[in-house]
Amino acid sequence: TAPVIGEADLDLMRRLAAAGTEHRKYLRMLTVYVDLTAPLYWWKEFDTYKVGTVANSCSTMHKIHSKEFTLDDFSHEHLVDTCEGGLLWYHTLNAIIYALNDARNSYLETNQKRFWWMMIQLLPSSYNQKRTVQLNYQVLKNMYFSRQNHKLDEWHTLCEWMESLPYFKEIIIQEG
């Protein structure tokens, strides 16, 4: 359940948030934990937010061989299954998945590290990785206003999630 904040406290929080960095220090104490699953290309951008974040990932290095690769393990919503420029984009990802599973099966059968290396080096940046992340409202504020109009859909999804957090709109966005 969301915490209940009285009108006087909410008004003070709004005014402090609007007054500048030195006045909104309390935002750093509003901690948020979330499980995020996103493609590696998105995590590379997320990792620029090092101050005020802690993340623990499901280790790709140790778990890459633990299950068969499927199309659902990858972000692929923008791939088209038509021939553009001589390539069938959707089929290219399927071919990579086939190669990854071939390397995985060889690794499981032989335990030879060269097959593990093939999985690691063939893994596309569209591979979805899950991380448990600790953030705070100050970091979320920075992300929100820096990334709300970003070209990656994943940032829009995260910003929409932020808007659903208790009092985020009232304190950070300050609508109404």
Image (cartoon, rainbow, N blue to C red):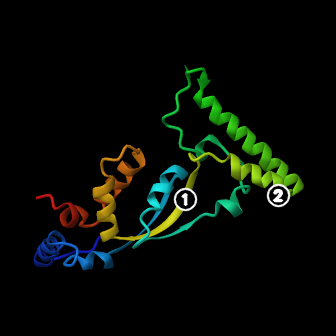
Identified at 57% across, 47% down, the residue is 125
Pair 2/1: label in front: 2
The part of the image, by quadrant, that contains residue 48 is bottom left
Quadrant the C terminus occupies: bottom left
Sequence order check, earlier mark of 2 and 1: 2
Q: Position of residue 24 (x, y in %)?
A: 22, 76
Q: Quadrant of the N terminus?
A: bottom left
Q: Position of residue 35 (x, y in %)?
A: 48, 63
Q: Residue furthest right?
A: 110
Q: Residue sitting at 48 percent across and 52 percent down?
A: 42
Towards the viewer: 167 or 28: 28
Q: Is residue 38 above or below residue 53?
A: above
Q: Would you say the residues marked 2 and 1 are in contact, meaning their CB atoms lie under 8 Å apart?
A: no
| Residue beneath disc 1 | 130
142 in relation to 26, above or below: above
Q: Is residue 136 left or right of residue 16?
A: right
Spot occupied by residue 87 in the image (x, y as percentages of width and height): 60, 24
Q: Is residue 102 left or right of residue 55?
A: right
Image label count? 2
Q: Looking at numbered disc 2 in the image, what kind of residue is underneath it?
A: Lys
For mark 2, what is the residue?
A: 113
- Name the element at disc 2: helix
